[in-house]
Image (spheres, rainbow, N blue to C red):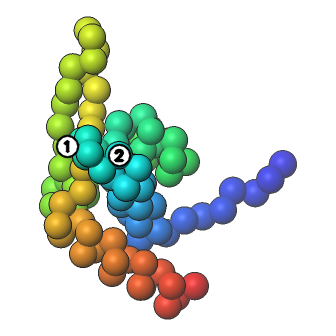
Amino acid sequence: MEKKQYRSSNMIIQNILEAILREKKKNPVKNKGIKKSHLISFCNLKTYTAEKYLIKMTNAGYIEHNEESWGERIINIYNITKLGKERYEWFVKINTEIS
């Protein structure tokens, strides 16, 4: 059985911001953000853990949360803010220095 590798909070936040930025680069015209399910999958997080970080990051002003209807379902879309872009660069620098 493979041992799971621990990721710091900084690295998880960086991964979430990176996922949103990648989606923005992939679809610059639509620029709606990333679906919550895609974000969780990209970051390889459990739903509970992802939700905890998404709430904290929304409250800190790093990301924005919107709901959209998709047929009868409501989907959650996340987008990065200006502060989130600044913090992403900061997290990349910090995590590079300590690695």
In the image, 22: left or right of 52? right
SS type, badge 1: strand
Q: Which residue occupies 26% across, 9% down?
A: 72
In depth, the one of 13 and 21 nearer the eye is: 21
Q: Which residue occupies 24% across, 66% down?
A: 84
Q: Is residue 69 above or below residue 65?
A: above
SS type, badge 2: loop
Distance Cα–Cα, label 2 vs label 1: 18 Å
Nearest to N terminus: mark 2 or mark 1: 2
Residue 27 in sight from this viewpoint: yes
Q: Quadrant of residue 5?
A: bottom right
Query: Which class describes the residues within 10 Å of circle 2: few (<14), some (14-19), or many (20+)?
Result: few
Q: Which residue occupies 26% across, 41% down?
A: 30
Query: Residue 31, position in %: x, y?
Result: 25, 46
Numbered circle sitting on residue 32: none
**Tag 1: amino acid:** His
**Tag 2: amino acid:** Asn
In depth, the one of 52 and 92 nearer the eye is: 92
Q: Residue furthest top?
A: 72
Residue 55 in sight from this viewpoint: no
Q: Which residue is mark 1?
A: 65
Q: Residue furthest bottom?
A: 97
In the image, 23: left or right of 42? left
Numbered circle sitting on residue 27: 2
In the image, 27: left or right of 61? right
- Give the quarter of the figure containing the C terminus: bottom right
Q: Is residue 62 above or below residue 78?
A: below
